Every structure is written in structure tokens, then in C-alpha cells.
Amino acid sequence: MIRKFITGLSGQLLILTILFVLLAEAVIFFPSASNFRKNWFEERAMSARHQAIALNAAPESYNRMMLSETVMKDTDITMISVEVNGESRLVLGAPPETSDIKTIDLRKNWGGLMLGPTLSAFTEKEGYFRVLADPPGGQWKGGNYQTLEYLVPRQSLQKAMESYCHNILGLSVLIAFITGVMLYSVLRFLIIKPLQCLGDDVADFENDPSAPLQKKRTHDRKDEIGDLSRAFTDMQEGVQASLEQRKRLADLGLAVSKINHDLRNVLTSAQLVSDRLATDKDERVRKMGERLVRAVDRGVRIAEGVLEYSSEKEDVLDLETVNLAAIASEAAHDTLRRYDYVSFENKIDPKLLAKADADHTYRIFQNLIRNAAQALKDRPDAKITLDARNGGQNIYATLSDNGPGLPDKVRASIFTPFSTGGGRGRTGLGLTISKELAEAQGGNILLVSSDEQGTSFELTLQAA
């Protein structure tokens, strides 16, 4: 349990908060320790001044020994002297026998961080400090004070610094812990808990993506977590829509597989008739038979293509050099028989060759021409124009019509399966299949423009 808490985001947040607070305390420790050292000397200088004034006013019979012991006990000062009219006069104590004495002048400016003396105060125990300070006010037995001087053992400062360090360390740990807990509590309420709720929602969605969506507890937040929650909801809706679409495709595949089986039986007799017509001596009848043979074969391939699309099988391509103008003319001739109100103009250069699958390319042109013709049913001057240019490695064929254009909603999902422009009896698979057929050949289909002037699609194929 403890290990899980430490390795989790909550435990790491708490530990990092405490460490950062301790680090901040460590940064400010040395300036505060230096300031403590300065104040420690100044406090004893103040006590020495008061003691000098008290002894100056005391009668000669006063018990100086008892007063000296009291001062030593309270302040650790071992000697006090004053300079009066250029002469040093002893107030309390006596000079030590040792010569290990370091002089400190409090009359100078102590601004800034004194790192060296502060660090040495933790280690120096032997010897004394000789401290020079400003004298007290008044006079010493008729003379003017000039300087105050006192001696204090270094060990006293060292003990005071150690005590100060222990107090600061304990206080820092307490502040770090309290700050860490408070910050942890706030961040857990604002961040950790909402993220845990969002993580539970992700786990639930992973276990059952088709379950009805529930409103999330973080959905109404205005911050980044709210944005993440709303983005996750949008992703869930997209995934569920994709799953629904897959189910529909699976159902479609099952239905087409049944239709394909029956369609082959129906077309068997048509194939026999078309084969006989294709071998007739009459040239006119023979051409009609050959076209009927190709139409029957394409019907079988279309049924198989829809089946393979729904079952996610890849088409077997037969890339060869094809005459783009001839394939487009044949597709337009076969498609526009039902749309006699549409005029078709093929501007493709008859010498323009592409490297493509003839049947796939025929189906692409057929789908594009059929869609354009259906969009032009209410136009008295309905016209479809097909042109192409050689771009070096690729050929770009543009099919344009003078129809009313596509609605914005249709334009946004025009290549999405089952997305139609509202035409009756349409499946919404034509452009989807055409785009996949083009991409399988190393090309693509793009919607170039669609407005009140008409709609244009661009088909990209490899140049021969």
C-alpha cells in the first residue's frame, strides 16, 4: 500500500513538495545563520554596556565578584573593559592566559552574507572572541567613554549556532510537512482526484466501448482537465460511431455475399448469350456482344468489390498501360444512357497514357460521372466536362459539372462510407470505394471545389 502510494502521482507530489520546501529553507539558511551570529554579538554588546553603566553607578563596597558571576552565567562574557580618555579600564573579569583570540569590530558595517565566519562558527570551540563595540552613554568616573570591549568564549557561539541550527531544522521540517500536506490536499482535490475519475472512465470505456455514455464529473470544468474530459467524450462518440459503422459494414458484407451468390447464377445465362453474340459474324452484333460481356463481368466484379470492401480484403491490382481517354469515354457512354439530359465533353488527349488498373479506373470514372449526372437532374443545361494533364510522374484528371454544388455538411464527409447527398436509393459508398480504388493504384481523389458554379473532382493516377 505504501509502495503504491509512493510510486503513484499523489505520493510523488507530496514528496516533491516537501523536498522543494526544504530546498528553499536550505537556500535561506546561511543568510539567516549569518544574521543570527551578528545579533548574538550585538546582544552581548548591549549587555556589556548595561553592565558598565551599572558598575559605574554602584558604590565601591558592592560585591563585584557576585555581579561578575551573574553576568558570566547569563551572557558567557568573561571580561568587560572600556576605553576612557585613551586609557583602557577593566570593568569585569580578567584577561585570559591564552593568546588564541580573534578580534571582531561591531562598529564596522556588517552588510551582506559572511559565509566564511558563519561556517567557522560551527566548528571553532577553542579560544576567545575580542569584540569591539560602541561605548555606552554617559561618563566613567569623570571621563568620556571611547570604546567598549568584551571577551566571549568561541565555544559559547558554537553551542548557540548548533542550537539555532537544530531549531531551524525542526521548524523547516514542520513547515515543509504542513505546506506539503496543504498543497497536496488542494492539488489532490483540483487535479489528482479528477484525473483518477477520468482514468476510471477510460478503463470503463476500454472494457465496454459500446456502453451508453455517461456525463463525466469533470465535463463542466473550464480548465485543461475540462478540455481533456470533453475531448475524451468526443473520442468516445467517434469510436462508437466507428463501431456502429463497422457493424453496418459487416451486415452489408453478409447481405452482399448472399446477393453475390445469387447474382452469379442469374448472370450465368447472360454470359452464355453474350458469348454467342460476341462470336457472331455480324460485326455490329459482335461489338454489342463484346460490350455485353464486359458489362456482365463488371457486374460480377462490382458485387465482389463491395463484398471485399465490407470484409476488408485488398483488391488484386493489374497495373498496365491504359488509354485514359478511351476508358473515360466508355464509362461515360455506359453511365449516361439513363441520363439523356446530360451532355458530356471528353477533353482528354487520346495519346495520354496512364499506369493503372483498367477495371478500377473504369469504376472510378463511372462513379464520378453518375454522381455528377444525378446532381444535374434539374438543370436544363446540364453538362459534364472531363479533362486531364500530364504532371510528369502523375496524371491529373479533372471532372467538372455545372450543378448547384454540394452542401457544406456533405462536403465535410463526402468520402465517409454511407455519407450521401440525400439522393434517393444511394448507398453512400460510391466515392468511398472510388477513393480506395485510386489509392490502391498509387493515386488519390480530391474535391477541388464545389459552389453555385459547379463541382470539380481531381483524380490522380501514375503516368505511364
Image (tube, rainbow, N blue to C red):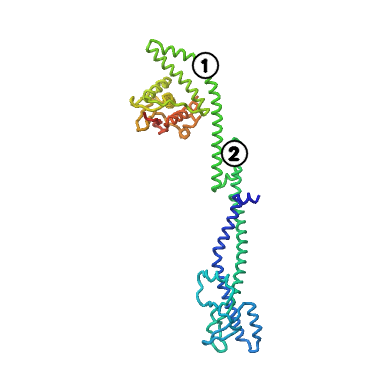
**Is 153 above or below relative to 85?**
above
Residue beneath label 2, please? 206
**Is 190 above or below relative to 345?**
below
Q: Earlier in the sequence, mark 1 or mark 2?
A: 2
Residue beneath label 1, please? 265
Residue 376 visible in the current orientation = no
Residue at the extreme top:
281
> Which residue sits at x=58%, y=70%?
123
The picture places residue 301, in percent across and down from the top left corner, at: 47, 22
> Which residue sits at x=54%, y=31%?
246
**Residue 166 left/right relative to 385:** right
The picture places residue 32, in percent across and down from the top left corner, at: 56, 68
In what quadrant of the picture does the C terminus appear? top left
Q: How many marks?
A: 2
> Which residue sits at x=49%, y=16%?
267
- Image mark for residue 81: none
Please tell me whether mark 1 sits on a helix, a strand or a loop.
helix
Q: Amino acid at mark 2?
A: Glu
Cα–Cα span, label 1 and label 2: 45 Å
Depth check: give the residue in front, 212 or 69.
69
Residue 151 visible in the current orientation = yes
The picture places residue 63, in percent across and down from the top left corner, at: 66, 86
Q: Amino acid at mark 1?
A: Asn
**Residue 88 left/right relative to 453:** right
- For label 1, the crowd category at 10 Å Cα-Cα, with few meaning under 14, some 14 to 19 and many 20 or more, is few
**Is 409 above or below relative to 172?**
above
